[in-house]
Image (cartoon, rainbow, N blue to C red):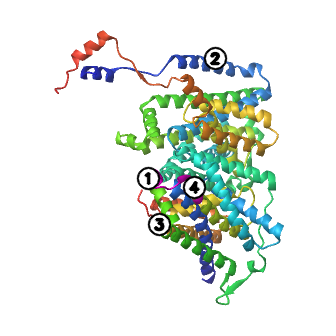
């Protein structure tokens, strides 16, 4: 029974991380209808960036965020202005351009950093845990990870509905042409959205790279996790995305309990089942 | 236009061929005839290369059929390549079936498996369909890794006896496999051209141009998409089965690899010209020419292909062939639709026969 509770807690905490992947993905889909196939690869880029920042400066992964987050934001802004803005509009170009980008990023990373698995070491905090009962202990790191995820999603929610920038995001999302007439510079707004999306996933990338090893081809898996969380949560709702992430984390944790080789399959199967039962997701905001 | 004339046009025959398509068809006929004869004069290496060319022409054409015509941008076609490969292997190992029997069985299985997949994925719109198809391929990859009966993670090797059962001598075997690949490529393109000429083809073009308008005109969009997905899944599995017959071993990672299969299908189609039957053929030629020059480094090659594909998508979204075709009005397959007015006398007859509706 305690073991079961332990698995549940692990799953929920992991889900926060998936919600962060998903949050970045649904943010840019919401603002510019862009599904970024290279999303996962950009997470991996952030992880590599953290890895080398830590080596160069001799700092821990959390301190490295001070550099990784602004760098990711800058990369996102530049990527959007120089490339992705030109692909928007139709359905096909953004999909195929980001697909090409994904293949390019993976192979550039492979040439630069080889196929070696790497990991970010966070020091003693990795092993620290809180004991609730003699049998039940919860790791400090997963809790931090989950709290950070909650804070970021809450922050995004505030930004979207309480700030001027958020209003510009929503206006461009509703009708880009009219938003432009109202004096909003769409290309700039899109680039800001991409910068925001990549800053969010930079945080998530550092956390996942502390949890597991990564290599140049780890991106697609992360993209799929984020995507599953988005769809399961219901399009367009940030808190729904959190629920989707938690559900995915739970499914993986329980699947891993049944068979060591099973966690990801279990996550995919739960996703596909939910797609049959409730294609609109758990908490859809926009009716499709 | 008078009502009578309108009725006459409604009865007018639709003509698919044009001057350029007649020239094109002559060209294809001569080309295919030459290629059929290759085993009689070409060497082993050339046949090997051409076999690979045929498999990519066929695979890319099928992806183009999905993405360029039905708007189903799948990145999970490796599901079907892998399933086809495993079907041929398991039929040979478990039931002792000849690979020539395994080939059509792979097609049947591919088509059957495609039905539930497409029913599931059609719940997802647009770009989300794309990633959904990837999830399905991942599930196949993981299941085949987990099940020891199909070799688990280390996969299966094909016993020499199975390969020999195709044809006794090595020469005869290689020729036969060569012809099967050629036949598959020709059949895939032929079936696509024929399907595009039916009313489903017209429906596909309507969906591609404007999905909402197509629905409003009574087209069952999901049904049309389902047909395309199932046909394409069946054919992809057949090609996959023979691709792995040549490789002599199969693992879940080689079978369900997105990089080995779908990435190439997409780059070939995008560069050659998406949404045109000629596109993947042109794209495959470019793909192999580039590979001959850059074969040394797989990752450099993929980076260059990716850059070229992105450039094409942004600068000339219809690809190389789309650019050429728009510029010169070429169409190498009889796929255009022109209404031919019957001669004047005939038209007058019809106008008399068909009563003009009262205004």
The answer to whether marks 3 and 4 sit on the same chain is yes
Tell whether label 1 touches label 4 (CB within 8 Å).
no
Where is residue B83? Give x, y as percent. Answer: 62, 46
Tell whether label 2 touches label 3 (CB within 8 Å).
no
Magenta-highlighted residues: A175-192
- Residue A284 visible in this rendered orientation of the protein: yes
Q: Quadrant of residue B246?
A: top right
Q: Nearer the viewer, residue B324 or B129?
A: B324
Query: At 70% across and 68% down in the image, what residue appears?
Result: A206
Q: Which residue appears farthest toward the top when viewing the image?
A: B345
Q: Nearer the viewer, mark 2 or mark 4?
A: 4
Q: Nearer the viewer, mark 3 or mark 4?
A: 4
Secondary structure of the residue carrying numbered label 4: helix
Q: Main secondary structure of the magenta part?
A: helix
Question: Going from the N terminus, do you reach mark 4 or mark 1 first?
Answer: 1
Quarter of the figure that contains the C terminus of chain B: top left
Label 3, residues with CA under 10 Å away: few <14, some 14-19, many ≥20 = some
Question: Going from the N terminus, do you reach mark 1 or mark 3 first?
Answer: 1
Q: Tell whether B299 sits left or right of B334.
A: right
Q: Which residue appears farthest toward the left when viewing the image?
A: B358
Q: Quadrant of residue A18?
A: bottom right
Query: Can you identify the residue that label 2 sits on?
Result: B30
Q: CA distance from mark 2 to mark 4?
A: 54 Å
Query: Can you identify the residue that label 4 sits on?
Result: A188
Query: Can you identify the residue that label 1 sits on?
Result: A178
């Amino acid at each position: 029974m305690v073991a079961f509770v332990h698995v549940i807690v692990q799953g929920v905490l992991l889900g926060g991380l998936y919600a962060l992947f998903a949050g970045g993905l649904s943010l840019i889909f919401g603002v510019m209808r862009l599904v970024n196939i290279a999303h996962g690869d950009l997470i991996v880029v952030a992880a590599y960036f953290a890895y080398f920042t830590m080596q160069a400066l001799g700092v821990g992964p959390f301190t490295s965020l001070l550099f990784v987050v602004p760098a990711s934001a800058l990369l996102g802004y530049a990527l959007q202005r120089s490339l992705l803005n030109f692909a928007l509009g139709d359905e096909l170009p953004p999909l195929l351009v980001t697909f090409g980008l994904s293949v390019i990023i993976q192979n550039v990373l492979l040439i630069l950093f080889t196929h070696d698995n790497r990991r970010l070491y966070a020091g003693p905090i990795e092993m620290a845990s809180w004991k609730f009962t003699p049998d039940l202990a919860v790791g400090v790191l997963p809790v931090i990870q989950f709290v950070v995820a909650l804070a970021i999603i809450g922050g995004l929610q505030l930004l979207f509905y309480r700030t001027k920038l958020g209003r510009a995001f929503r206006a461009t999302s509703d009708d880009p042409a009219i938003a432009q007439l109202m004096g909003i510079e769409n290309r700039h707004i899109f680039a800001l959205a991409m910068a925001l999306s990549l800053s969010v996933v930079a945080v998530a990338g550092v956390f996942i790279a502390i949890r597991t090893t990564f290599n140049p081809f780890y991106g697609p898996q992360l993209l799929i996790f984020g995507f599953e969380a988005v769809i399961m949560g219901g399009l367009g709702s940030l808190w729904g995305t959190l629920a989707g992430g938690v559900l995915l984390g739970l499914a993986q944790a329980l699947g891993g309990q049944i068979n060591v080789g099973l966690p990801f399959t279990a996550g995919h199967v739960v996703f596909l089942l939910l797609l049959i039962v409730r294609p609109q997701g758990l908490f859809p905001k926009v009716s499709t | 236009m008078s009502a009578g004339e309108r009725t006459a046009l409604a009865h007018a025959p639709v003509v698919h061929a044009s001057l350029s398509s007649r020239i094109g068809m002559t060209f294809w006929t001569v080309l295919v005839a030459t290629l059929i004869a290759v085993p009689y004069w070409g060497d082993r290496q050339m046949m090997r290369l051409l076999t690979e060319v045929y498999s990519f022409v066929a695979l890319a054409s099928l992806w183009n059929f999905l993405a360029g015509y039905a708007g189903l941008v799948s990145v999970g076609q490796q599901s079907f390549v892998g399933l086809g490969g495993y079907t041929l292997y398991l039929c040979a190992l478990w039931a002792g079936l000849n690979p020539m029997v395994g080939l059509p069985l792979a097609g049947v299985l591919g088509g059957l498996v495609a039905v539930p997949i497409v029913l599931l994925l059609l719940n997802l719109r647009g770009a989300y369909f794309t990633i959904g198809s990837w999830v399905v391929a991942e599930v196949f990859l993981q299941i085949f890794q987990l099940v020891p009966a199909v070799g688990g993670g280390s996969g299966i090797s094909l016993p020499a006896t199975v390969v020999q059962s195709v044809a006794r001598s090595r020469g005869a075997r290689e020729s036969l496999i060569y012809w099967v690949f050629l036949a598959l490529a020709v059949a895939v393109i032929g079936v696509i051209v024929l399907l595009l000429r039916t009313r489903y083809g017209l429906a596909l073009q309507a969906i591609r141009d404007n999905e909402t308008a197509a629905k409003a005109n009574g087209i069952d969009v999901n049904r049309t998409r389902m047909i395309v997905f199932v046909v394409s899944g069946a054919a992809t599995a057949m090609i996959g089965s023979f691709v792995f017959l040549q490789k002599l071993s199969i693992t879940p990672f080689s079978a369900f690899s997105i990089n080995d299969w779908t990435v190439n299908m997409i780059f070939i189609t995008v560069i050659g010209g998406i949404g045109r039957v000629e596109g993947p053929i042109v794209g495959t030629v470019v793909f192999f020419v580039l590979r001959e020059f850059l074969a040394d480094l797989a990752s450099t090659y993929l980076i260059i292909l990716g850059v070229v594909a992105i450039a094409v998508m942004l600068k000339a979204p219809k690809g190389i062939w789309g650019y050429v075709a728009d510029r010169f009005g070429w169409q190498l397959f009889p796929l255009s639709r022109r209404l031919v007015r019957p001669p004047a006398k005939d038209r007058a007859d019809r106008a008399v026969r068909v009563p003009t509706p009262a205004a």
